[in-house]
Image (cartoon, rainbow, N blue to C red):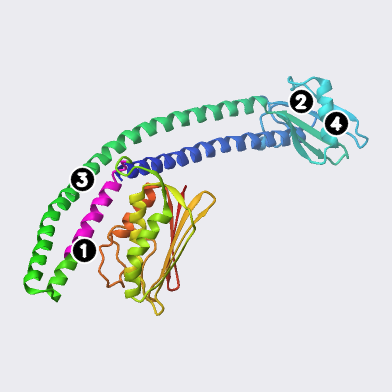
Amino acid sequence: MIKKLRRKFILISMLSVFLVLFTTVGIINISNYVVINNNANDALVEVINQGTKDDPRGGGRPEDRRIDLREEHYFIAVVNNNGEIIDKNYMHMFMYSEIECNEFILNAYNASSSNGKYDYLRYKKEVKSDGNTYIGFIDTKDKMNEFNRYLLLSFLISIGAYLILFVLIYIGSKLVFKSTEEAYKNQKRFITNASHELKTPLTIISADIDLIEMDNGKNEWSESIRDQVKRLNEMTNQLVTLSKLEEEDKSRFPLSDFSINEVFNKAVETFEPSFKKEGIKFSYNIMSNISMYGNKYLIDELIYIFLDNSLKYTAGEAKSSYFVISEEKNKVIFRFSNTISKDDEVDVRQITDRFYRSPSNKKEGSGVGLSIAKEIIDYHNGKINIDKNNATLSFVITFNK
């Protein structure tokens, strides 16, 4: 259990770190990309405003709004209505030849969009008052290469930081959970020792009751003591089973193929008379020849828990309990359902918590049974879905074969 908690702690911590790093690096790089685009667009507006004049300091706008073009590679051309280039300025473009520039100009002129790009070359076109189309181009290759280098560098730094944080969290979690693990081991040791210590006095009490009944016959007091001894024995065994399951030691409960039909039929034979005695309409439907890979003892315990739970807590005007076991697409599915009182306040989110008891439930019980069932299901990598619909409580358990 502590190992599971530690793994969850590491997983949640690393997921949080990943989200923070991803968000931070993403925002920074997106911002850089937006800045590059905005600067390119501003520069293109300046080039269009300036026309074919040669003023790299930005002479196409008022002094306070000039865009400095001296660090840009750009060119501009003027095209008439016949698609002919009537004026141009290639003085600040060193990346492409004049022939290539002419080709870019004509492609941009014939394009439907007023702005666009060819690889790293961005363009903007605008029809001015003289009726001619002014097309400006600016090369962003250097800036995009710088952006890509920064993107790669930030990615590598993030991976390095992520790995370092993983090591720190891994080591830190070991220190954080050390005291918890010790307390948990002490708790399990106490449960095991207490269980063994309780067995002896319980056995003696049971034997003494037998002797008393031989001398004086059975009475309500001896029967009450015997019931309490039985209840204490069951609770002790449940706590020991729960403690063993939480150790995550597969050698304690080895896995093998076995018949579900055989296990279920034996359990039903044990409980059917009790269901009749309690006036519960008990029915079941199990497919023939169902087998699964798991621990036979634990699955038998699981079925016993749900049958016992149904026997104890089935309520309502028409008390009924229904059990179905089927095989679907390489999965074994258990469906257990029983009627409950309409005013039952059971919380399906907490029902498998250890020692949970419904506030409206007045019947005897330890509140351990369904928590053991959950541990058995987890031990077999199964899934459980619990639903409360009107006056029916349903459990659907799915195992891989």
Q: Which span is picked out in magenta? A: 229-249
Q: Residues within 10 Å of mark 4 (few under 14, many from 20)?
A: some
- Please report whichever mark, 1 or 2, sits nearer to the chain's N-terminal start: 2
Name the N-terminal-most of marks 1 and 3. 3
Q: Find out whether the residues at labels 3 and 4 contact each other: C-beta distance under 8 Å.
A: no
User: Of the residues shown, which amino acid type is indicated by label 4?
Assistant: Leu
Q: What's the distance in space between the residues labelled 4 and 1, CA to CA? A: 93 Å
Task: Find residue 231 and name its label.
Answer: 1
Does residue 244 belong to the magenta stretch?
yes
| Residue 131 visible in this rendered orientation of the protein | yes
| 167 left or right, relative to 191 | right
Instruction: Tell me: residue 231, above or below residue 220.
Output: above
Q: CA distance from mark 3 to mark 2?
A: 80 Å
Judging from the image, what secondary structure is the residue with disc 4 in? helix
Callouts 2 and 4 close, C-beta under 8 Å: no
Which residue in the rendered view is the most extreme toward the bottom?
317
Q: Nearer the viewer, residue 252 or 104?
A: 252
Which callout, 3 or 2, points to the residue nearer the camera?
3
Q: Earlier in the sequence, mark 3 or mark 2?
A: 2
The percent position of residue 117, horizontal first and vertical second, equals 74, 33
Q: Nearer the viewer, mark 1 or mark 2?
A: 1
Mark 3 sits on what residue? 183
Residue type at mark 1? Arg
What secondary structure prevails in the magenta region?
Answer: helix
Residue at figure coordinates x 43%, y 33% from the top left: 162
